[in-house]
């Protein structure tokens, strides 16, 4: 069985809630990170994360497996992720610079 991830927030909730984004780049970075988190969660689910062998011998999905996959994806992102978010952010930034206003 895999150890549970540390889900302790890296910043206090009051700081996160009261700090509004000041530049579009912040929103772009958050969106890219959210996309990478969703991607990681879907990859964990596709890899069979959360499937357990039942008494009948069939592989069944734990009813809470999707929550666990989401939590593990968030924990992976808290530790830097796989680098997809930075590529997405850079690509979107380049596209935004190419569009004439």
Image (tube, grey):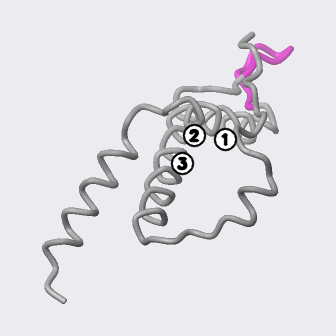
- Which element type, helix, strand or loop, lies under badge 2? helix
**Up-down relation of residue 10 to residue 53 (above or below):** below
Q: Tag 1 or tag 3, which sits nearer the N-term?
A: 3
Which residue carries the number 3 mark? 38
Question: Which quarter shows the N terminus?
Answer: top right
Q: Are marks 2 and 3 in contact (CB under 8 Å)?
A: yes
Q: Which mark is residue 41?
A: 2
Is 55 a magenta residue?
A: yes
The residue pinned by badge 1 equals 70
Query: Which class describes the residues within 10 Å of circle 1: few (<14), some (14-19), or many (20+)?
Result: some
The residue carrying pointer 2 sits among few (fewer than 14), some (14 to 19) or many (20 or more) residues within 10 Å by Cα, namely: many
In the image: residue 75, left or right of residue 33: right
Q: Which residues are magenta?
A: 52-61
Indicate the position of residue 14 as horizontal and vertical percent values: 81, 57
Q: Position of residue 52 (x, y in %)?
A: 75, 20
Quick check: marks 2 and 1 in contact, CB under 8 Å?
yes
Relative height, residue 66 to residue 44 (above, below): below
Where is residue 99? Give x, y as percent.
Answer: 16, 79
Answer left or right for 6 relative to 45: right
Real-space Cα separation, disc 2 to disc 3, in angstroms = 5 Å
Mark 1 element type: helix
CA distance separating discs 2 and 1: 5 Å
Which of the marked residues, 2 or 1, is nearer the chain's N terminus? 2
Image coordinates for residue 58, horizontal then vertical, percent: 73, 20
Q: Nearer the viewer, residue 83 or 19?
A: 19
């Amino acid at each position: 069985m895999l150890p549970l991830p540390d889900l302790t927030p890296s910043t206090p909730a009051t700081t996160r809630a009261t700090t509004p984004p000041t530049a579009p780049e912040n929103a772009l970075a958050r969106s890219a990170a959210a996309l990478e988190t969703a991607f990681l969660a879907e990859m964990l689910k596709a890899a069979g994360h959360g499937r357990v062998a039942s008494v009948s011998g069939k592989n069944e999905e734990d009813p809470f497996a999707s929550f666990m996959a989401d939590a593990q994806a968030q924990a992976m992102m808290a530790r830097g992720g796989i680098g997809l978010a930075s590529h997405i952010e850079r690509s979107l930034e380049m596209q935004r610079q190419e569009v004439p206003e």
